[in-house]
């Protein structure tokens, strides 16, 4: 027996229409045969990439390390990683003798970081083929393997530099990893878009998300209200 037929009918109408809209969202009718979820995910990935181009600022910040030597022993995760990093350094014009999984590094830090940032810029602009061709690593046509190796090598430099009291150098290395390599690697193959060019679409999606969430919530609320499962403040019994 329903406690409130009108509320129950309203709730079921909301939930059925919610399901109908969800069915449309999951249909490949948006953009180039994408579902609504794929379309929104693609848009926000593009906007994220468009707001993650920090490379010009990074280039300026690492200029102060031009001509400054960084001399540390970098321990990699494995001998294979050490060999890969050694190969990258060799191609970039640096010598780093290997001993097992470690590399003895003595490099011009500014020059090294500038090369990595240059590669990151190519990757960000989806021109990884040039990076892959330059280093010539096996199975690395798009350059992602090389950039992953650069990230691992630079990450391995941070603690040794800190131990040598070269904190500014360690911070610069970390900056290149976080602000140059990571965005370039993670957003590779995604077209960058500016939020200024997509304000109506992005705002529409966000507004729809809020309304659609409330739509479901009110539907559930009304159904429960209709079957008598509503929350209300209990009355305080007065003592006689």
Image: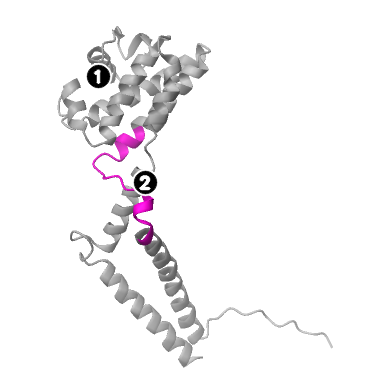
**Residue 54 x/y as whole percent:** 39, 34
Visible residue check, residue 227: no
Check disc 2 and report the residue beneath it: 48
> Could you say which is closer to the camera, residue 2 or residue 201?
201
Visible residue check, residue 125: yes
> Could you say which is closer to the camera, residue 235 or residue 95?
95
Residue drawn at 31 percent across, 35 percent down: 184
Mark number displayed over residue 225: none
Is 13 situated above or below 90?
A: below
Is 236 situated above or below 209?
A: below
Q: Per the image, is 12 magenta?
A: no
Quick one: label 1, few (<14), some, or many (20+) residues within 10 Å? some
Q: Quadrant of residue 185?
A: top left
Magenta-drawn segment:
182-200
Is 176 situated above or below 13?
A: above
Provide the secondary structure element on which disc 1 rests. Answer: helix
Mark number displayed over residue 84: 1
Mark 1 → mark 2, Cα distance in angstroms: 31 Å
Q: Quadrant of residue 10?
A: bottom left
């Amino acid at each position: 027996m329903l406690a409130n037929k009108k509320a129950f009918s309203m709730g079921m109408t909301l939930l059925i229409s919610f399901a109908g809209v969800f069915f449309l969202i999951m249909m490949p009718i948006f953009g180039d045969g994408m579902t609504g979820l794929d379309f929104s995910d693609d848009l926000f990935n593009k906007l994220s990439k468009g707001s993650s181009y920090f490379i010009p600022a990074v280039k300026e910040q690492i200029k102060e390390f031009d001509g400054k030597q960084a001399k540390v022993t970098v321990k990699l995760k494995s001998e294979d990683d050490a060999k890969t990093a050694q190969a990258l350094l060799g191609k970039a014009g640096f010598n780093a003798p290997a001993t097992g999984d470690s590399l003895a590094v003595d490099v011009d830090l500014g020059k090294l970081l500038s090369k990595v940032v240059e590669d990151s810029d190519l990757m960000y602009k989806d021109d990884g083929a040039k990076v892959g061709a330059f280093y010539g690593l096996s199975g690395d046509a798009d350059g992602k393997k090389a950039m992953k190796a650069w990230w691992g090598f630079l990450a391995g430099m941070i603690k040794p530099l800190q131990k040598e009291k070269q904190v500014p150098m360690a911070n610069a290395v970390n900056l290149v990893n976080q602000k140059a390599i990571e965005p370039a690697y993670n957003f590779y193959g995604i077209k960058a878009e500016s939020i200024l060019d997509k304000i109506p679409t992005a705002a529409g999606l966000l507004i729809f998300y809020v309304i659609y969430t409330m739509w479901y919530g009110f539907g559930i609320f009304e159904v429960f209200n209709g079957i008598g499962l509503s929350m209300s403040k209990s009355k305080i019994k007065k003592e006689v």
